[in-house]
Amino acid sequence: MSSTSAAIILLAGAICFTLMPTVTRAAEFANCANETAIGRYSLVEVSNCAESDASCVLKRNSNATISITFTSTEDLSQLKAVVHGIILGMAVPFKLPNDNGCKDSGVECPLAKDTSYRYSTTLPVLKQYPKVSVEVKWELMAGDKEVLCVLIPAKIQ
């Protein structure tokens, strides 16, 4: 191939790359469970969070609903939600109106192992919360055992 042909191919490639539409990274929920976790999530849903959003937008002075579909490798008699907001690398505990995962969450205890459940809760995004990007660390616990942990990229607006 001559150097002129190679230059034309490189120029054409550069033009095509420049004219391509910008691809938006979808919100990626990350597994943060430790190796001893006794469960696994298969689906995470956050209200008003589109697949094309890089972060889930949590509007102040409104409510946000989170749903997690999961299974456990053990029978569970209890389930508790533990939530932290990670801002600038610091985990800040978040007090839920209801942290009992077996009450008003779509899940009734006891839970049977290897069965799919859909945990769902609604929480207030208070007006006094600062407008900030935050990673939400959502854990479901059974006593001192971690069932699951998911990181949710979010922006409070």
Image: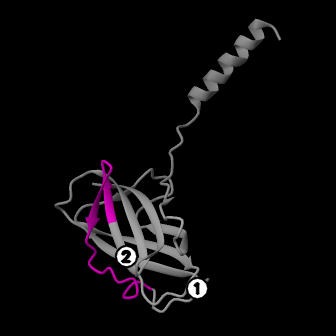
Q: In the image, which residues are magenta?
A: 84-106
The amino acid sitting under disc 1 is Lys
Q: Is residue 114 left or right of residue 123?
A: right
Residue 131 belongs to the span the image colors magenta: no
Label 2, residues with CA under 10 Å away: few <14, some 14-19, many ≥20: many
The residue that label 2 is drawn on is 81
Q: Is residue 135 left or right of residue 145?
A: left
Mark 1 in CB contact with mark 2 (< 8 angstroms):
no
Q: Is residue 135 left or right of residue 35?
A: left
Residue 154, image x, y percentages: 37, 56
> Would you place residue 7 above or below residue 80 in this image?
above
Residue 77, image x, y percentages: 46, 90
Sequence-wise, which precedes: disc 1 or disc 2?
A: 2
- Taken as a whole, is the magenta stretch helix, strand or loop? loop
Residue 52, image x, y percentages: 50, 52
Q: Count the marks: how many?
A: 2
Tell me the number on the disc at residue 45. none
Q: Residue at x 37, y 60 (%)?
A: 136
Q: Nearer the viewer, residue 154 or 50?
A: 154
Q: Residue at x 45, y 52 (%)?
A: 53
Assign a secondary structure to mark 1: loop
The residue that label 1 is drawn on is 113
> Would you place residue 49 above or below residue 19 in this image?
below
> Would you place residue 152 above or below residue 83 in this image?
above
Residue 101 belongs to the span the image colors magenta: yes
- The colour scheme applied to this rendered structure is one colour
The amino acid sitting under disc 2 is Ala
Q: Quadrant of the N terminus?
A: top right
Q: Nearer the viewer, residue 11 or 30?
A: 30
Assign a secondary structure to mark 2: strand
Q: Is residue 8 left or right of residue 55?
A: right
